[in-house]
Image (spheres, rainbow, N blue to C red):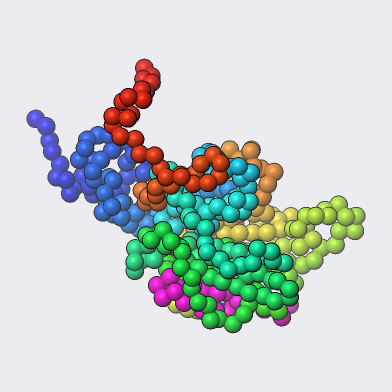
Amino acid sequence: MAAYLPLELITEILTKLPVKSLHRFKCVSKSWNSIITSSKFIKQHLHQTLISNTNTNIMISTNYIVSSAISTVKFRFEIVNHPLDHLPNRSPGTITGSVHGVFLLIDSSTKTLCLFNPSNKTQRLIPPSPSRKPAVVFKLVEVFGFGYDGITDDYKVVRLAEWEIFGYFDRESSVYSMRNDSWESVNDETVSYTLQEFNGVAVDSTFWFVMSSSNSDSMLKCFDLRTSTFSLVDFPDLDNDIGEVMVSLRSLRGCLCLLVSYHKYRADPDNKFTGNPFYNHEFLYADVWEMNESKWVKLFKIRKNEIRKDCMYLRLVTYSKDMKSVLIEVDSNWYGWYDLVTKKFKRVPVQGLEAVEDSPYVAYPYVETLVSVVNNKVVSKKGGTRPKMIIKKNDFLSSGFKLKL
C-alpha cells in the first residue's frame, strides 16, 4: 500500500534541502515542480537557508569565476560558467558581495553590469545608468553596491560617481530597481568627501562606502535603501601614530565589520620589489570592529606572529558555522581559519585555483538559493542585448533535435 505524505510536510522537508537536490526533484512530478518553482517556496527556502547558515560557499572572480564550498579541511574550487563570456574584449571583471546568493558582476572594459545567481544560473543584464558626466573627464571614480530592500521586496543597485574636469569636481548618485528594471537619480546632500575606489558593502537595507577628505580623514558614507537618503558615519578611533592604515569592509553576521590593518614602511634598498604595492608596507597587526546599534565595538585583534611572519595584508571572508573561527584571506592569495579562542591560525589547502594563482583575488561568501534574477534579455556575441527568444512547441518540433542514448 502506498503511503502519502501531506503536501505541507513535503514542502517543509524540501525547504531544508540544498539547491542542487531541488533542481533534480523538480522532475519527480508536476506537483513537486510547481512547489519548488513557486515564489512562496523560494522565499521559504531562502529563509531556512539564512537561519540555518547552511549551503555556504565562496566565489572568486579574476579571468574566471570559481566557486567552492566553505570547508575547514580543503577548498575545492570549480569553474563557474561566466554569464558575460560572450562579450568581446571582456575584462577579468569584479564582483560585489552576494545578497541572497545573487552577485553583481561588473565588466570594466565594456561597462556592463549583470546580476547573476550561480546556484540556478539565472542572470539579468542591467541597462546603463543615465549620466550627466561629460564625455571627457580628467579623473573618474565609479563604485557600486548591490543589496535588498525588504520593505518593497526589491533588489537594488546603487551607483556613486565622481569626476574632475578643468579643476572642478562633480558627482552623481542613482539607484537601479530590479522590480522596475530602471534607474532613478537620488539626491546626496552630505558634505563633500572624496569617493574611494572600493565597491559598497550591503548590510540589511543599507550600503556603506569608504570616503576621505583633503586632510586624509576617512569616513563612511551610508545609503539607506528604504528612505533613499545618505548620511556620514565616523570611523572608530584608530591608532594613527602607528604608521599607515588600511581598511577593509565586510558584512558578517548581518553586521558591518571593519578590519583596520596597521603597517610600517619597509625600505627596499636594492629595488627588488619595485612595482609591488604590498612589499614596502610591513603588516603589524589588525583590529576588527563591528557596527552594533550605531556604535563601533572592537571584537578582536589579529597580530602578525599569529598569522605568518611575512604576511602583508589581511581581509575577512566569513565566520565559521559555530562562530568560533573566522576565515581570513591573506595577501589576496591564500586562506586560513583564525580561532578566536586560541588565537591560532590554520592554513587551508586549496585545489582548483591553478588558472588564476598568478593574480591576486578577492573571495566573497554566498549561500545557495533559488532566487531568480532572469529577465527577457540575453548577451549577444556582439556585446549588445537582444530579446530572449521564446520557442513555441510547434517551432521546436519542426526544427528537429538530437537524441543521445
Furthest toward the right, the residue is 270
Q: Quadrant of the N terminus?
A: top left
Image x and y of residue 109, in percent? 63, 51
Q: Nearer the viewer, residue 93 or 22?
A: 93
The magenta region covers 215-242
Image x and y of residue 84, in percent? 53, 44
Q: Nearer the viewer, residue 279 or 40?
A: 40
Count of numbered marks: 0
**In this rendering, is residue 178 above or below 206?**
above
Q: Quadrant of residue 400?
A: top left
Examine the rendering and report whether any part of residue 322 can be seen.
Answer: no
Examine the rendering and report whether any part of residue 386 can be seen.
Answer: yes
Image x and y of residue 275, in percent? 80, 55
Image x and y of residue 43, in percent? 30, 55
The residue that appears at 55% across and 44% down in the rendered structure is 383
Question: Is residue 229 highlighted in magenta?
Answer: yes
**In this rendering, is residue 351 above or below 129?**
above
Furthest toward the top, the residue is 405
The residue that appears at 43% across and 47% down in the rendered structure is 377
Answer left or right for 149 relative to 309. left
Q: Quadrant of residue 181?
A: bottom left
The residue that appears at 40% across and 72% down in the rendered structure is 226
Q: Quadrant of residue 405?
A: top left
The residue that appears at 70% across and 71% down in the rendered structure is 165
Answer left or right for 30 relative to 106. left
Question: Is residue 106 highlighted in magenta?
Answer: no
